[in-house]
Structures are given as structure tokens and as C-alpha cells.
Image (cartoon, helix red, strand yellow):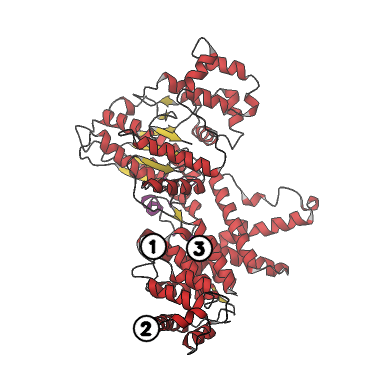
Amino acid sequence: MTGLFAPDGPKVFSIPAGANFLAELTRTLAQETGLKNDPEALADALIYVPNRRSERALGFALHQAAGGKACLLPNIRALGDLETDEPPPSAEAALADLPPVISPASRIGDLTQLVMRYFEHTGRHMPAIACLAAAKELARLLDQAALSGEIDWGALDSLVPNAQLAKHWQQSLEFLEIISKQWPAHLAESSKMDPYTRRLEAARAMAEHWQSAPPDAPVIIAGSTGATPASRLLMQAALAMPNGLIVLPGLDTDLDSRTLEHVSETPSHPQFTLTRTLKALGLRPDQVASWPGLIEPDQHTARRRLIHQALAPAQSTADWTANLASINTHDDPADFVRDALQGLTVIDAADDTQEALLVSVLLRQTLAQNGQTAALVTPDAGLARHVSAMLKRWKIDVAPSAGLPLSQTDGGSLALLIAEWMLDPSHPVALMAVLNHPHCKFQKETIQKLDKFFLRGPRAWQDWTALIARLRAPEPDHPHRAKISESDKVEIIDLMDQLNALLNALPLETGHALSGTDWYRHVAELATALATSPHPWAGDAGSALSTLFRDMAELTAPLGTQMPALWNELLQGEMQLQTVSTGAIHPNLVIWGPLEARLQTADLIIL
């Protein structure tokens, strides 16, 4: 080890925006530790990164920094940051001997029960589905409070004297007792923990362990903005260790005291989380060192300073001409701005379709330049999917890194179609939608004959029994049926007999209320029976679908019996919220969300 881990050296660094974070991080670590010559140089180190994706990317970057040679990787762990729902690393949780985390579905289901009890106690009737929606909002409030780390639910009652509260405000306070009093008691009784509370306790246990037995090997927290109380706690503990380092992503080290104060009061500002983290560490931006060995081109410095000035809070922009002069590195401010914006292009699109087309063309052009890479970075999942679909016109497969909604996967779409068909099995459109699904196991030729000879035209039947009777009727009741051969009719009747046997095997009355557990079990059983094996449970999408059906049973248990149409509505809504990674990774092109792009870069970035 050399200067990077010197006892009197800085412990908090920043790699500026625009630099390749992981490449710069691993290059310096490799030089400082001699990784190219000693493959075990970092084997004992512990490195925290924001999420699972950056965990994998760091391992690859270290391999490249070692010159492509085999090396023993350090212990790389994902902190889990603001936008992720990843659990704390298992080592920290085991160290604290913490109770298990409550599953998301059980959490919503248990909160729903508490909400229903509240309305029963107050004598007000509230539909079960409304109680479920309220429970989801309470869960979001719990998460936001845990992420802020500054919420004291016990102070709610003392905010305003009761005499000064309007009646509806008093009712709101009583309702919030569900999460301020009843929820902690419920978790204690069931020996479970909320996810963010468990993460914080795991971090506290690790910090105490470090304090009592500081590790000799380096402990590095890299790429985290300190968005969660748990990550800030680990950062504070790392600073107290002899070989602890913190490497922040894109901190504006030029913030003056006045602007820093304004930024710390503006949660929407991109530097807000970083400034809050610095406050927790007891540091100012100018006390954060630049990452060793990093040489930032003058143009990158100019662009970074200009963009930081453009994003300054409104209170700091009154003297923008003076501020521009202070960051100007040229004789003429106009030359400084032109230099800073060189290589930056703004394209106005007429509509969403043109926007997706322009992005697709820019990505495709990159492939004409040997070895060049390009990335689309967008928070808009719809745009990401649109661009991915357009690229397939040119046989370029670039799946959004965030994945597709489960409802758009083959297994998810089949389950939704089956659930809709079960509401009225004799409905011709719903029936054909299921039978024409790519994973449906029946012969497509037979399905086409069923459609042509029996289902087209006005619907002349009311239910499934009447449809079966129509197929078996000896006399044709439609001009097309006069042309059907006996062998075709036998094929169609055999197909319908198989469907009839599957439906009769289910104790299902779609016109009556039933529990969510029963309904989703029937949907899953039919999906298994109708699909070609191993669908719809194959691969990542199949695993996610299986987990969803299990979770839906837990989530809907407090709602009792409801009409099947309601269960279908809930199933579709939950499928839209869950994403599944699809497609192979393209070697040159990627589509990222903002969090995924934080520590990565490409030759061409499209925002």
C-alpha cells in the first residue's frame, strides 16, 4: 500500500461527473496495490457499491485493471440505494442476529388488515379494495420515513394541540397511528422487521463490529451518494478506520458556502443527497480530495462547471454573470461556453415516435464505428421499450436493462389472457386470444378451423355449455359449417373436449365471489395445463410469475371473497409494477435507467 492509504492522507474522494467512474477507481486501486503483479493484492479488501449491477461491473473493471490477468477479487457487496429494494448484505444481517425481513406481499396484506380494523372501529364502511390502496400508501410512507432517517412518529400528537385541529386533521392523526403504534407492535409480535429498518440495524451492527475490531484490509465505499441512513452510517464508520476510504460520484467540490446552503434546502437538486452526506460526515465540499491519478481534460472541467452553474438553485442565480466570470478559464466567456458545450447536441423531437426513431438511428450509427459504444439513459420505461422495438427492425437486439413489465412477457401475458377468459369461457375473443398465444400447446391449424367454422359471426350462444352443444349439433347453423369435413369437425370437438375437461376439473363459478387465493390457484393451474412445457414457468420470467402468484395469495388474503373481475384487475396492476430482464447483453449498445448509469459510461451518451 502507498499514498492512497497513508495515515495522514485524505479519506474522502470524488470522481467527477463525465469520468469513467469504475475505470478510474480500479486503475488507481490496481496501481496503489500492485494488482498487476500480485493477483492477491485486493483479495482481503471489502468494497461496497450501490447495487447488484455495479457489483458485477466492478468485478469486470478490476479484471481489466489487472491487465486481463486472473486475480482474486475483493469482497464486493451491494449497499442497496435509494431507488432499489435490495436487502442488506447477508453478512451484516447475520452479524446483528436480526429477525427475518417481512415479505413485501405479507407487509401489504398485514397493513390492509390494520386499515380494515381501523374503519371497522370507527364505524365507517370502506371497500376492501380501498383498504388495500390505503395500505400501499402507508407502506410508501413507512419507506420514505425510513429513508429520511429523521422521522419521530411519537411527535405526531404534539405537533398541534388537539383543540386547534379541525376534525379531519384529528382523523388523519388517528389513522396514522396504524404505522406509528400498531405496525411496530405487529412486527414485534410476529418477529419480523421492515426492510429499511433491518438494513439500518444491519449497518449499525457492522459499524460496531468495525469499531471493536477494525479490519487491517482496506474498506472502501465507492459510488454511493449516501442516500440512506444505513449507507451514511457505514461511511462514518469507514472514516474511523485506518484503511477506510469513501469515493463519492460526481460531487461539485466548487460549491461555495452560500450555494451549499441553498442546495441543502432543495431536495430536487442533484447535489442535495451528496451535500446531506457531507454534513453527516462533518465535511465541506472543498475538503473532499480529487481521486489520485485522475487527469480531467480542460473541456470536461469547463462543461462540468458550466452544468453545475446551470443547475444552481434559483436563489444563487441572481449574479449569474458574475458567477460565469468566476468559473471562466478563457479570455472571452463566450469562448468558454462554446468550449464547454463542444460535442454536446440538443435535438428537438416532434413527438414520442420521432424521439424513439432519432435515438434508434443514433444508436445504430455507433455500430458503424468499430469498437465504439453508445448508451441511452432515460427514466422513461416506455421510451426504452420503444427504442428497443425499433432497433429490432435492423436485427439489433438491445433489451432495456430495467427489463420488461411481467405482463409483457410470454408467461405473464398468457396468465392474464387465461384469467380474462375464465370470466366467460365461451367468449369468442377471449377464447381465441388464449388459444392463439405462442405458448398454447394446441395445434394452430385446429384453432383456425374452430374460429372459421364455429366462432365467426354473431354470438349465438350464452355460455360454455351452449357453445359445446353448438359444436355437436348435427345440422349446420352457419354457411361456413356446411363446408366443414367430418375429420375437421372431429379435431375441433376433440380440442373443445380437452378444454371442457380442464374447466370442469376446477370448482369454479365465475359469477360468484371467491377468495383471491382460490382464483389465482385456478389461473395458475390452467396456465400449466394449457401451455407447452416448461412454460409458463421457465426462465427468469417464469420464476417471477411463480413468485407473483404466491405473493398475490398473501396480499389478497385480508380482502376475503370478491368477484373474479376484481382479482384480475389487481393481478394486471401488480404485473405492471414488476419487471423482468430479457434478451442478451449487446457488446456495444445499452439502454440504462438513471441509477444504472451512475457508475458507467459510453463513447456516446443519449439523455
Q: Secondary structure at mark 3?
A: helix
Q: Is residue 278 left or right of residue 212?
A: right
Q: Quadrant of the N terminus?
A: top left
**Would you call the spot at circle 2 few (<14 residues within 10 Å), some (14-19), or many (20 or more)?**
few
Image quadrant in which you'd find residue 59: top left
Look at discs 3 and 1 and give the one toward the viewer.
1
Point out the stretch of residues depicted in magenta.
79-105
Q: Is residue 440 left or right of residue 279?
A: left
Total marks shown come to 3
**Would you call the spot at circle 1 few (<14 residues within 10 Å), some (14-19), or many (20 or more)?**
some
**Who comes first in sequence, dot 1 or dot 2?**
2
Does the image show residue 599? no
**Would you call the spot at circle 3 few (<14 residues within 10 Å), some (14-19), or many (20 or more)?**
some
Amino acid of disc 1: Ser
Per the picture, the main secondary structure of the magenta-coloured stretch is: loop
Q: Position of residue 73 (x, y in %)?
A: 27, 42
Q: Is residue 280 magenta?
A: no
Image quadrant in which you'd find residue 240: top left
Q: Position of residue 298 (x, y in %)?
A: 42, 18
Q: Is residue 290 above or below residue 576?
A: above
Query: Which residue, given by chain and number where applicable, does mark 3 sit on?
Result: 105
Q: Nearer the viewer, residue 38 or 410?
A: 410
Q: Position of residue 397 (x, y in %)?
A: 37, 48
Query: Which residue, given by chain and number where applicable, does mark 2 sit on?
Result: 487
